[in-house]
Amino acid sequence: MRDAGSTALVIALAAALGVAGCSWRKTTWELGMGGFGMELIVAHLDERGPYLDVGLAGHGLYLRSFVPASDVCRAVLRPEAEVKYVERGVGGRFEREEHSCDAVGFGDPLIRGARQPRAAGRRSGPVPRAQATFRTIYEDADVVLLRGRFPLASKIGWAGGQDSVAVVDNVARCRRPVEKGVASMEYRPAGRNTLALVGDKGLCRIEGLIQPPGQAEQEGASAPGGD
């Protein structure tokens, strides 16, 4: 588990990165107009089975990304290193010292930002539901990785809903869905729980979506200077 004190320090340092350009970069990125490179600091990196779970901060942003647990990606995304983030592919590309690593999944704020806009004049309506089926492929004290079918992932533009890996927190409200391997899945166009599994103790929020192992390994690492 990451050290909370050191993570907070890195985030504080990252907040000072590019102070002059902080507001406009954050605003244009949140509006989907951020098709440019920007420097971010690696605030934390945790290995989760076949993936690296990465937090990056800078310019008023904090991004959660998932990349293959490859030597190249470990070298690029070294904790406390400054990396260049470029929007492309599944969840962006990270570049450092002529090497690059492509994301194979993402968490917030990309999940929230990718939601479908509400219909004009529509304040509320039925919460869309569909059945998700999955199996656990990795678990630690913090998270569980579930591989399977998550049909409502298409609501945020995710193309792999028939075979994807969903990241959920390893907490009581998620235990029943995790153990059963099947649950109702909900999508909300507003609020914190964009995508969630329904359990007997409440909503088990989907914290991230990742391409399945194999496909992710093929797409995640790039040769020096390559595309």
Image: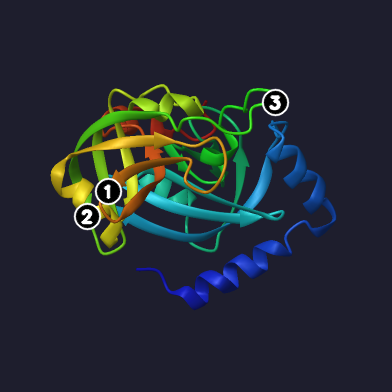
Q: Residue at x 72, y 53 (%)?
A: 59
Sequence-wise first label, 1 or 3: 3
Element type where label 3 sits in the image: loop
Indicate the quadrant where residue 173 lies: bottom left
Amino acid identity at mark 3: Gly
Within-10-Å neighbours for mark 1: few <14, some 14–19, many 20+: some
Q: Which is nearer the eye, 77 or 212?
A: 212
Q: Earlier in the sequence, mark 3 or mark 2?
A: 3
What residue does disc 1 label? 199
Q: Nearer the viewer, residue 168 or 123?
A: 123
Q: In the picture shown, does residue 80 fall above or below 194?
A: below
- The span from disc 3 to disc 2 (Cα, nearest Å) is 38 Å
The residue drawn where x is 29% and y is 32% is 212
Task: Give the residue type at disc 2.
Answer: Arg
Q: What mark, if any, has residue 171 been given in the picture? A: none
Tell me, yes or no, if residue 98 can be seen here. Answer: no
Name the residue rendered at 25%, 42% in the picture.
146
Q: Are marks 3 and 2 in contact (CB under 8 Å)?
A: no
Residue 67 image point, x, y percent? 40, 42
Whether tag 2 and tag 1 are in contact, CB under 8 A, the answer is: yes
* Residue 121 tag number: 3
- Which residue has dot 2 on it? 175
